[in-house]
Image (tube, helix red, strand yellow):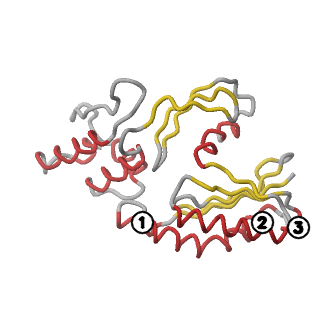
């Protein structure tokens, strides 16, 4: 069985072909540099970039996989959560392909896909398991009782971890996305130089807005602070 996968939930356009016997045949991902100057994803720019890129990526993914459209057995596509304008691009292409080729259309939940990605490394992951989902828009601690049966034990009360990284990176004059930039910059800093609050309130939830605000106030009070130390 060969499945074509399409992902456009945020600022990356991705098209892949999966074979249940051979595994991943192709995985083409296009990131969007358009958002760097804004320090975060601009929804309108994201959807327009998906429109430009998805058809060329589709052709390239099929070519790299050595698969003709008629050889596919299904089309899988992210249906949410995410930026609605971006999601609509992927959904429209996936629906058109499925209808034109007479294939089943498989809707994929964005967060569930994050959880299932662990199976790519180890298909025999024992259950139940605890998983931390940390992305640009979501930070959740999820108990997987069995595949398809989940219980959210904790989540962020405000900003997601990825969003906090992006906003702090912008404060520090670093690039986008913020996570890799902060990680790289922090390697040259003193971990004992600055004491910021931990984003863990009582219970299982997270809170990153206080950490973000603490960085802002610290930079206002210490304009000459070393960026690597703050990172």
Where 77 sits versus 147, above or below? below
Residue identifier under label 2: 62
Distance in Å between CA atoms under marks 2 and 1: 29 Å
> Residue, x 79% and y 55% (percent of image)?
3
Local secondary structure at mark 3: helix
Q: Nearer the viewer, residue 157 or 61?
A: 157
Residue 139 in the image: x percent, y percent?
Answer: 46, 40
> Residue, x 37% and y 48% (percent of image)?
165
Residue 210 in the image: x percent, y percent?
Answer: 26, 39
Instruction: Please tell me in which quadrant of the rendered image residue 38 appears.
Output: bottom left
Residue identifier under label 3: 70
Residue 124 in the image: x percent, y percent?
Answer: 74, 29
Distance in Å between CA atoms under marks 3 and 2: 11 Å
Q: Nearer the viewer, residue 120 or 104?
A: 104
> Residue, x 61% and y 32% (percent of image)?
150
Where 76 sits versus 199, above or below? below
Local secondary structure at mark 1: loop
Distance in Å between CA atoms under marks 1 and 3: 36 Å
Query: Farthest residue toward the left?
Result: 221
Local secondary structure at mark 2: helix
Residue identifier under label 1: 42
Relative side of 180 to 131, left or right: left
Of the two numbered discs 3 and 2 on the same chain, state the one appearing first in sequence.
2
Where is the C terminus found, in terms of image quarters? top left
Of the two numbered discs 1 and 3 on the same chain, state the one appearing first in sequence.
1
Where 126 sits versus 136, above or below? above
> Residue, x 21% and y 41% (percent of image)?
214
């Amino acid at each position: 069985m060969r499945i074509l996968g399409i992902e456009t939930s945020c600022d990356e356009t991705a098209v892949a072909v999966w074979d249940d016997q051979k595994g991943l045949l192709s995985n083409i991902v296009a990131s969007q540099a358009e958002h760097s100057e804004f320090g975060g994803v601009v929804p309108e720019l994201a959807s327009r970039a998906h429109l430009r890129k998805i058809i060329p990526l589709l052709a390239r993914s099929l070519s790299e996989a050595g698969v003709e459209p008629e050889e596919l057995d299904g089309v899988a596509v992210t249906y949410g959560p995410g930026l609605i304008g971006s999601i609509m691009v992927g959904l429209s292409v996936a629906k058109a392909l499925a209808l034109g080729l007479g294939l089943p259309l498989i809707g994929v939940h964005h967060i569930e896909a994050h959880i299932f990605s662990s199976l790519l490394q180890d298909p025999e992951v024992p259950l139940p398991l605890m998983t931390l989902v940390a992305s640009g828009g979501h930070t959740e601690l999820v108990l997987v009782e069995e595949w398809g049966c989940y219980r959210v034990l904790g989540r962020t009360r405000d900003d997601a971890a990825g969003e906090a990284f992006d906003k702090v990176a912008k404060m520090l004059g670093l690039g986008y996305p913020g996570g890799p930039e902060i990680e790289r910059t922090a390697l040259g800093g003193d971990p004992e130089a600055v004491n910021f609050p931990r984003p863990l309130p009582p219970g299982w939830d997270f809170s990153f807005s206080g950490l973000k605000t603490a960085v802002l106030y610290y930079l206002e009070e210490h304009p000459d602070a070393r960026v690597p130390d703050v990172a």
